[in-house]
Image: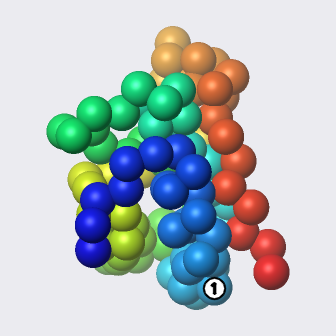
């Protein structure tokens, strides 16, 4: 799949696969970093903040989510969870995160 180029493209692709994302255990998803600020370049990865259900909190479940997202978006992804946020950088991420609605 062609790599995403814009914030709108990232959000549209994620919403287009919301059923698959929920099936993988993704309860909530947010975009942050260079794509949310419209500063992404050709080598930029996609930074996502995800609330994961129990099935995605295993090592295999987490990597299934990451592999799916990388294939979907055509770029490397970094998936962080709210509980995994550093107390130093976490507040900055939470201020800029753009929610990606996954409800049907």
Q: Residue furthest right?
A: 104
Residue 90: x, y in percent? 56, 24
Residue 95: x, y in percent? 68, 22
Residue 64: x, y in percent? 35, 76
Q: Is residue 37 left or right of residue 78?
A: right
Q: Residue at x 63, y 35 (%)?
A: 97
Q: Quadrant of the C terminus?
A: bottom right
47 vs 64, nearest the viewer: 47
Q: Quadrant of the N terminus?
A: bottom left
Q: How many marks?
A: 1
Q: Residue at x 71, y 69 (%)?
A: 102
Q: Is residue 66 left or right of residue 8?
A: left
19 vs 58, nearest the viewer: 19
Q: Residue at x 63, y 19 (%)?
A: 91
29 vs 41, nearest the viewer: 41
Relative height, residue 59 to residue 17 (above, below): above
Residue 25: x, y in percent? 57, 76
Q: Residue furthest top?
A: 88
Q: Is residue 91 left or right of residue 76?
A: right
100 vs 79, nearest the viewer: 100
Specify how the rendered protein is coloured: rainbow
Relative height, residue 96 to residue 77 (above, below): above
Q: Residue at x 28, y 33 (%)?
A: 41
Residue 39 seen anywhere in this rendered image of the structure: yes
Asked where in the image residue 70 lies, by quadrant, the reply is: bottom left
Q: Residues within 10 Å of mark 1 (few under 14, many from 20)?
A: some
Residue 59 seen anywhere in this rendered image of the structure: no
Q: Is residue 43 left or right of residue 88?
A: left
Q: Mark 1: which secondary structure?
A: helix
Query: Residue under circle 1?
Result: 19
């Amino acid at each position: 799949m062609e790599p995403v180029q814009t914030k709108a493209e990232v959000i549209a692709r994620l919403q287009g696969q919301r059923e698959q994302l929920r099936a993988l255990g993704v309860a909530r998803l947010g975009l942050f970093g260079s794509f949310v600020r419209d500063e992404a370049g050709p080598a930029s990865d996609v930074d996502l903040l995800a609330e994961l259900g129990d099935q995605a909190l295993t090592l295999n479940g987490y990597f299934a989510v990451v592999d799916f997202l990388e294939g979907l978006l055509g770029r490397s992804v970094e998936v962080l969870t709210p509980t995994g946020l550093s107390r130093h950088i976490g507040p900055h991420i939470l201020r800029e995160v753009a929610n990606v609605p996954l409800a049907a």
